[in-house]
Image (cartoon, helix red, strand yellow):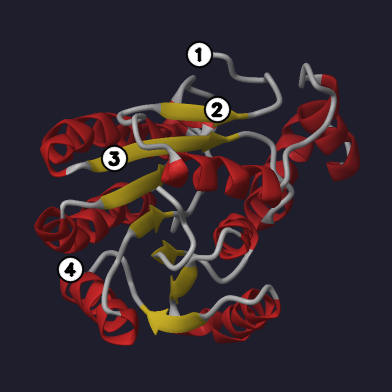
Amino acid sequence: MDLKGTVAIVTGGARGIGRGIAYELAKEGARVAIADLPATSADRDETIAGIKRLGSDAVAIDVDVRDFAQCQAMVQKTIDAWGQVDILVNNAGVIKVGPVFMFAEEDWDFIQDINVKGTFLCSKAVAPHMMQRRKGRIVNLSSMAGKSGRGGVSAYCTSKFAVIGFTQALAEEMGQFDVTVNAVCPGEVDTYMWREVLLPAIALGTGVSKEEAWEQAAVKNVPLKRPQTVEDIGQAVAFLCKADNITGESINVTGGSEMH
Protein backbone atom coordinates (compact mmCIF):
# COMPACT_ATOMS: atom_id res chain seq x y z
CA MET A 1 0.00 0.00 0.00
CA ASP A 2 1.32 3.40 -0.98
CA LEU A 3 1.15 5.54 2.16
CA LYS A 4 0.92 8.88 0.36
CA GLY A 5 -2.44 10.42 1.25
CA THR A 6 -3.33 7.73 3.80
CA VAL A 7 -4.63 8.43 7.30
CA ALA A 8 -3.06 6.93 10.42
CA ILE A 9 -3.91 6.91 14.10
CA VAL A 10 -1.00 6.46 16.50
CA THR A 11 -1.96 5.92 20.12
CA GLY A 12 0.57 7.10 22.67
CA GLY A 13 1.90 9.20 19.82
CA ALA A 14 2.95 12.29 21.77
CA ARG A 15 6.52 11.25 22.51
CA GLY A 16 9.09 8.46 22.42
CA ILE A 17 8.44 5.54 20.10
CA GLY A 18 5.00 6.91 19.23
CA ARG A 19 6.53 10.13 17.98
CA GLY A 20 9.14 8.21 15.99
CA ILE A 21 6.38 6.16 14.34
CA ALA A 22 4.32 9.25 13.57
CA TYR A 23 7.29 10.96 11.93
CA GLU A 24 8.18 7.97 9.76
CA LEU A 25 4.58 7.61 8.58
CA ALA A 26 4.47 11.35 7.84
CA LYS A 27 7.67 11.05 5.79
CA GLU A 28 5.82 8.48 3.67
CA GLY A 29 2.97 10.94 3.11
CA ALA A 30 0.48 9.82 5.73
CA ARG A 31 -1.65 12.23 7.73
CA VAL A 32 -1.46 11.35 11.41
CA ALA A 33 -3.86 11.60 14.34
CA ILE A 34 -1.79 11.81 17.51
CA ALA A 35 -4.00 10.11 20.08
CA ASP A 36 -2.87 10.42 23.68
CA LEU A 37 -3.91 11.54 27.14
CA PRO A 38 -4.71 15.25 27.69
CA ALA A 39 -1.73 15.49 30.05
CA THR A 40 0.60 15.01 27.08
CA SER A 41 -0.69 18.10 25.26
CA ALA A 42 2.67 19.94 25.21
CA ASP A 43 4.52 16.90 23.82
CA ARG A 44 1.68 16.26 21.41
CA ASP A 45 1.81 19.81 20.08
CA GLU A 46 5.55 19.41 19.49
CA THR A 47 4.97 16.17 17.59
CA ILE A 48 2.28 17.75 15.44
CA ALA A 49 4.56 20.69 14.64
CA GLY A 50 7.25 18.24 13.58
CA ILE A 51 4.85 16.40 11.28
CA LYS A 52 3.83 19.65 9.65
CA ARG A 53 7.48 20.54 9.10
CA LEU A 54 7.76 17.25 7.22
CA GLY A 55 5.04 18.47 4.87
CA SER A 56 2.17 16.36 6.16
CA ASP A 57 -0.84 17.09 8.35
CA ALA A 58 -1.70 16.06 11.91
CA VAL A 59 -4.39 16.48 14.55
CA ALA A 60 -4.45 15.89 18.30
CA ILE A 61 -7.07 13.61 19.82
CA ASP A 62 -7.62 12.97 23.53
CA VAL A 63 -8.03 9.29 24.37
CA ASP A 64 -7.77 6.91 27.26
CA VAL A 65 -7.43 3.55 25.51
CA ARG A 66 -9.05 1.76 28.46
CA ASP A 67 -12.41 3.34 27.58
CA PHE A 68 -14.22 1.95 24.53
CA ALA A 69 -16.38 5.05 24.07
CA GLN A 70 -13.24 7.18 23.88
CA CYS A 71 -11.68 4.74 21.39
CA GLN A 72 -14.79 4.98 19.22
CA ALA A 73 -14.69 8.77 19.44
CA MET A 74 -11.01 8.71 18.44
CA VAL A 75 -11.84 6.83 15.26
CA GLN A 76 -14.83 9.04 14.47
CA LYS A 77 -12.86 12.26 15.03
CA THR A 78 -10.21 11.01 12.62
CA ILE A 79 -12.86 10.18 10.02
CA ASP A 80 -14.44 13.61 10.57
CA ALA A 81 -11.06 15.24 9.92
CA TRP A 82 -9.99 13.28 6.84
CA GLY A 83 -12.80 10.94 5.78
CA GLN A 84 -11.07 7.64 6.48
CA VAL A 85 -8.72 5.60 8.64
CA ASP A 86 -6.18 3.45 6.79
CA ILE A 87 -3.75 2.67 9.60
CA LEU A 88 -4.04 2.08 13.33
CA VAL A 89 -0.87 1.82 15.38
CA ASN A 90 -1.55 0.56 18.90
CA ASN A 91 1.49 2.03 20.63
CA ALA A 92 0.14 3.25 24.00
CA GLY A 93 1.82 1.27 26.76
CA VAL A 94 3.10 1.32 30.33
CA ILE A 95 5.51 -0.65 32.51
CA LYS A 96 6.15 -1.25 36.19
CA VAL A 97 8.90 -3.38 37.73
CA GLY A 98 9.06 -5.71 40.70
CA PRO A 99 9.17 -9.40 41.63
CA VAL A 100 5.93 -11.35 41.48
CA PHE A 101 5.69 -11.93 45.23
CA MET A 102 5.76 -8.15 45.84
CA PHE A 103 3.86 -6.96 42.78
CA ALA A 104 0.63 -5.12 43.57
CA GLU A 105 -2.56 -6.48 42.04
CA GLU A 106 -3.67 -3.00 41.02
CA ASP A 107 -0.37 -2.46 39.17
CA TRP A 108 -0.84 -5.77 37.35
CA ASP A 109 -4.36 -4.75 36.31
CA PHE A 110 -3.19 -1.28 35.23
CA ILE A 111 -0.59 -2.75 32.86
CA GLN A 112 -2.98 -5.30 31.35
CA ASP A 113 -5.71 -2.67 30.95
CA ILE A 114 -3.54 -0.35 28.88
CA ASN A 115 -1.20 -2.72 27.05
CA VAL A 116 -3.70 -5.49 26.25
CA LYS A 117 -7.23 -4.19 26.71
CA GLY A 118 -6.28 -0.89 25.10
CA THR A 119 -4.97 -2.69 22.03
CA PHE A 120 -8.18 -4.72 21.88
CA LEU A 121 -10.51 -1.74 22.31
CA CYS A 122 -8.79 0.47 19.72
CA SER A 123 -8.75 -2.40 17.23
CA LYS A 124 -12.42 -3.16 17.95
CA ALA A 125 -13.27 0.50 17.39
CA VAL A 126 -11.57 0.75 13.99
CA ALA A 127 -12.34 -2.75 12.66
CA PRO A 128 -15.87 -2.07 11.28
CA HIS A 129 -14.61 0.93 9.28
CA MET A 130 -11.73 -1.05 7.78
CA MET A 131 -13.98 -4.04 7.10
CA GLN A 132 -16.48 -1.85 5.26
CA ARG A 133 -13.72 -0.28 3.15
CA ARG A 134 -11.98 -3.66 2.70
CA LYS A 135 -8.68 -1.97 3.35
CA GLY A 136 -6.46 -1.30 6.33
CA ARG A 137 -3.38 -1.88 8.40
CA ILE A 138 -3.22 -2.51 12.14
CA VAL A 139 0.21 -2.57 13.78
CA ASN A 140 0.49 -3.43 17.45
CA LEU A 141 3.51 -2.62 19.60
CA SER A 142 4.72 -5.66 21.49
CA SER A 143 8.31 -5.95 22.76
CA MET A 144 11.29 -8.26 22.91
CA ALA A 145 9.78 -8.96 26.34
CA GLY A 146 6.83 -10.43 24.45
CA LYS A 147 9.12 -13.08 23.01
CA SER A 148 11.18 -14.07 26.09
CA GLY A 149 10.09 -13.64 29.68
CA ARG A 150 12.34 -11.58 31.95
CA GLY A 151 12.42 -11.49 35.73
CA GLY A 152 11.24 -8.32 37.40
CA VAL A 153 8.84 -7.37 34.61
CA SER A 154 6.37 -10.24 34.72
CA ALA A 155 3.29 -8.09 34.22
CA TYR A 156 4.83 -6.27 31.26
CA CYS A 157 6.03 -9.53 29.67
CA THR A 158 2.59 -11.06 30.11
CA SER A 159 0.95 -8.10 28.42
CA LYS A 160 3.35 -8.14 25.48
CA PHE A 161 3.05 -11.91 24.96
CA ALA A 162 -0.71 -11.32 24.91
CA VAL A 163 -0.36 -8.62 22.25
CA ILE A 164 1.38 -11.12 19.95
CA GLY A 165 -1.37 -13.71 20.47
CA PHE A 166 -4.02 -11.07 19.85
CA THR A 167 -2.21 -9.94 16.70
CA GLN A 168 -2.24 -13.45 15.26
CA ALA A 169 -5.92 -14.02 16.09
CA LEU A 170 -7.03 -10.68 14.68
CA ALA A 171 -4.95 -11.25 11.54
CA GLU A 172 -6.97 -14.40 10.86
CA GLU A 173 -10.26 -12.58 11.39
CA MET A 174 -9.40 -9.54 9.27
CA GLY A 175 -7.64 -11.25 6.38
CA GLN A 176 -10.84 -11.80 4.40
CA PHE A 177 -11.33 -8.01 4.42
CA ASP A 178 -7.81 -7.34 3.10
CA VAL A 179 -6.77 -5.85 6.43
CA THR A 180 -3.35 -6.88 7.69
CA VAL A 181 -2.48 -7.10 11.39
CA ASN A 182 1.12 -7.29 12.56
CA ALA A 183 3.25 -6.51 15.59
CA VAL A 184 6.60 -4.82 16.09
CA CYS A 185 8.83 -5.86 19.00
CA PRO A 186 11.26 -3.10 20.01
CA GLY A 187 14.43 -3.80 21.94
CA GLU A 188 16.64 -1.31 23.73
CA VAL A 189 15.30 2.12 22.78
CA ASP A 190 16.36 5.24 24.68
CA THR A 191 12.91 6.36 25.84
CA TYR A 192 11.24 7.32 29.11
CA MET A 193 10.45 3.67 29.83
CA TRP A 194 14.12 2.71 29.75
CA ARG A 195 15.55 5.88 31.31
CA GLU A 196 13.10 6.34 34.15
CA VAL A 197 11.86 2.82 34.93
CA LEU A 198 14.08 0.00 33.69
CA LEU A 199 17.56 1.48 34.10
CA PRO A 200 17.10 2.62 37.71
CA ALA A 201 15.84 -0.87 38.60
CA ILE A 202 18.72 -2.58 36.77
CA ALA A 203 21.26 -0.24 38.34
CA LEU A 204 19.88 -0.85 41.82
CA GLY A 205 19.85 -4.61 41.36
CA THR A 206 23.36 -4.84 39.94
CA GLY A 207 25.10 -2.09 41.87
CA VAL A 208 26.20 -0.13 38.82
CA SER A 209 25.32 3.31 37.51
CA LYS A 210 22.46 3.87 35.09
CA GLU A 211 25.02 4.69 32.40
CA GLU A 212 26.84 1.40 32.97
CA ALA A 213 23.54 -0.48 32.98
CA TRP A 214 22.60 1.08 29.63
CA GLU A 215 25.99 0.26 28.12
CA GLN A 216 25.62 -3.37 29.19
CA ALA A 217 22.00 -3.76 28.07
CA ALA A 218 22.03 -1.72 24.86
CA VAL A 219 25.55 -2.22 23.54
CA LYS A 220 27.51 -5.12 25.02
CA ASN A 221 24.59 -7.56 24.98
CA VAL A 222 23.43 -6.58 21.47
CA PRO A 223 25.00 -8.35 18.47
CA LEU A 224 24.98 -5.13 16.42
CA LYS A 225 26.58 -3.32 19.41
CA ARG A 226 24.21 -0.38 19.40
CA PRO A 227 20.82 0.52 20.82
CA GLN A 228 17.76 0.92 18.66
CA THR A 229 16.19 4.29 17.93
CA VAL A 230 12.64 5.53 17.64
CA GLU A 231 13.35 5.97 13.93
CA ASP A 232 14.21 2.26 13.68
CA ILE A 233 10.86 1.32 15.17
CA GLY A 234 9.03 3.82 12.96
CA GLN A 235 10.66 2.41 9.84
CA ALA A 236 9.53 -1.12 10.78
CA VAL A 237 5.97 0.10 11.28
CA ALA A 238 6.01 1.96 7.96
CA PHE A 239 7.32 -1.16 6.21
CA LEU A 240 4.47 -3.27 7.60
CA CYS A 241 1.96 -0.62 6.55
CA LYS A 242 3.29 -0.71 2.99
CA ALA A 243 3.52 -4.51 2.80
CA ASP A 244 0.51 -6.07 1.06
CA ASN A 245 1.14 -9.74 1.83
CA ILE A 246 2.45 -9.86 5.41
CA THR A 247 0.04 -10.49 8.27
CA GLY A 248 0.10 -12.15 11.68
CA GLU A 249 3.82 -11.49 12.10
CA SER A 250 5.76 -10.07 15.03
CA ILE A 251 8.91 -8.38 13.80
CA ASN A 252 11.87 -7.91 16.15
CA VAL A 253 13.73 -4.60 16.01
CA THR A 254 16.35 -5.41 18.62
CA GLY A 255 19.75 -5.34 16.95
CA GLY A 256 19.81 -9.12 17.34
CA SER A 257 19.32 -9.25 21.12
CA GLU A 258 16.09 -11.17 20.50
CA MET A 259 15.99 -13.66 17.63
CA HIS A 260 12.88 -15.74 18.36
Q: Where is residue 230? Give x, y as percent.
A: 67, 51
Residue at x 36%, y 37% (from the top left corner): 244
Relative to 50, residue 111 above or below: above
> Where's residue 217, x and y in %?
77, 29
**Mark with earlier residue (1, 4):** 4
Q: Is residue 112 visible?
A: no
Residue 196 is drawn in which quadrant?
Answer: bottom right
Q: Secondary structure at mark 1?
A: loop
Going by the numbered disc 4, the residue's amino acid type is: Phe
Q: Which residue is mark 4?
A: 68
Tag 3's secondary structure?
strand
Of callouts 2 and 1, the N-terminal one: 2
Q: Which residue is mark 2?
A: 252
Residue 260 numbered mark, or none: 1
Residue 128 vertical position relative to residue 62 in the rendered view, above or below: above
| Tags 2 and 1 touching, CB below 8 Å | yes
Label 1 crowd (10 A; few <14 / some 14-19 / many >=20): few
**Which residue appears at 49% of the width and 28% of the height?**
251
Residue occupying image coordinates x 37% and y 50%: 115
* In this picture, residue 257 sits left or right of residue 213: left
In the rendered structure, which amino acid carries the disc numbered 3? Thr
Between tags 3 and 1, which lies in front? 3
